[in-house]
């Protein structure tokens, strides 16, 4: 211990210099938007690489289950749209609906970091700008909505999870097409809340909730969950509906990133009114 103190005393000017340098860098990052953005992107890149390395080790010991999950998801996708997919060597496929004049592109990705226990949860995926990923793209699986892309680096992206206090998804009841909003209340990662459904509608436990397609982020018809309980609380004018989510957010590994090719055109047109 005495040697340690002697060493610190001998080189205390060097340690003081390092300390002041760290403080200076922190002040620059906090007070300059460009440097803060550069720091966040660099942090995302480093964290993404660390998460990727960790997942490679875990994945090696779970290859069988991963391959089984991939096979099941591919089969489910093919069964859902038997003639609508065109696969490429970059694992990107396209779905064209000529009746509704919509086109969506899907990019396969793997989750390399995920949280479900916080009030505001995020995911990290192993696809970034070089793969065509951009902020505000939707992220889904065959079982439902995962979240919305937030930050993108060259090789990785962070996703604001469905399990986030600020997430609001435009949804509808499948049997009657009535619109509402799905949110997460922060209590259970397997449940959500649907709002703005008027009390005159006839609801039943087990009714399916799907995406409405009105947000330009998610295609119409992506499954979300089923109605568990519903009531009109005192003073409210709408149902408060508890929804059992189809997805177990604690077990997801692979996702599809959604790009609405016509999103910018639709948004510009709607904002011009």
Image (tube, rainbow, N blue to C red):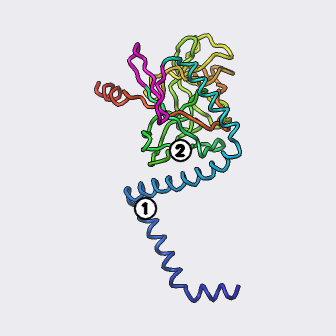
- The residue indicated by pointer 2 is 126
Up/down of 112 relative to 204, above or below? below
Image quadrant in which the C terminus is located: top left
Q: Position of residue 48 (x, y in %)?
A: 54, 51
Residue sitting at x 52%, y 35%: 108
The tag on residue 271 is none
Which element type, helix, strand or loop, lies under badge 1?
helix
Mark 1 or mark 2, whichever is nearer to me: 2
Residue sitting at x 50%, y 76%: 18
Q: Position of residue 7 (x, y in %)?
A: 61, 86
Q: Position of residue 142 (x, y in %)?
A: 58, 26
- Is 19 left, or right, of 271 in this rendering? right
For disc 2, the neighbor class at 10 Å (few under 14, some 14 to 19, many from 20) is: many
The tag on residue 29 is 1
Q: Position of residue 149 (x, y in %)?
A: 48, 39
Asked whether residue 233 is in view, the answer is no
Which element type, helix, strand or loop, lies under badge 2?
loop
Of 131 and 182, nearer the camera is: 131
Of 211 and 165, nearer the camera is: 211
Up/down of 71 relative to 23, above or below? above
Q: Which residues are magenta?
A: 84-103
């Amino acid at each position: 211990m005495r040697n340690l103190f002697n060493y610190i005393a001998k080189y205390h000017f060097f340690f003081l210099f390092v300390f002041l340098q760290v403080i200076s860098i922190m002040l620059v990052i906090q007070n300059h938007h460009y440097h803060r953005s550069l720091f966040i992107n660099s942090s995302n890149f480093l964290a993404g690489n660390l998460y990727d390395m960790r997942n490679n080790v875990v994945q090696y010991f779970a290859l069988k289950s991963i391959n089984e999950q991939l096979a099941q998801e591919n089969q489910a996708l093919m069964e859902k749209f038997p003639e609508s997919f065109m696969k490429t060597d970059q694992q990107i496929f396209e779905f064209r609906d000529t009746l509704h004049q919509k086109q969506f592109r899907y990019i396969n990705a793997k989750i390399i970091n995920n949280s479900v226990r916080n009030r505001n949860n995020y995911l990290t995926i192993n696809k970034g700008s070089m793969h065509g990923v951009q902020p505000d793209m939707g992220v889904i699986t065959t079982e439902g909505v995962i979240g919305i892309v937030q930050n993108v680096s060259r090789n990785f992206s962070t996703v604001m999870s469905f399990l986030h206090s600020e997430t609001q998804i435009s949804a509808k009841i499948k049997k009657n097409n009535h619109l509402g909003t799905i949110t997460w209340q922060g209590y259970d990662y397997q449940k959500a809340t649907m709002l703005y459904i008027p009390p005159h509608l006839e609801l039943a436990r087990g009714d399916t909730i799907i995406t409405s397609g009105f947000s330009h982020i998610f295609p119409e018809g992506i499954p979300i969950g089923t109605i568990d309980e519903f009531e009109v609380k005192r003073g409210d004018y709408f149902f408060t509906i508890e929804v059992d989510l189809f997805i177990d957010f604690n077990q997801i590994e692979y996702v599809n990133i959604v790009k609405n090719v016509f999103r910018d055109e639709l948004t510009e047109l709607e904002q011009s009114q």
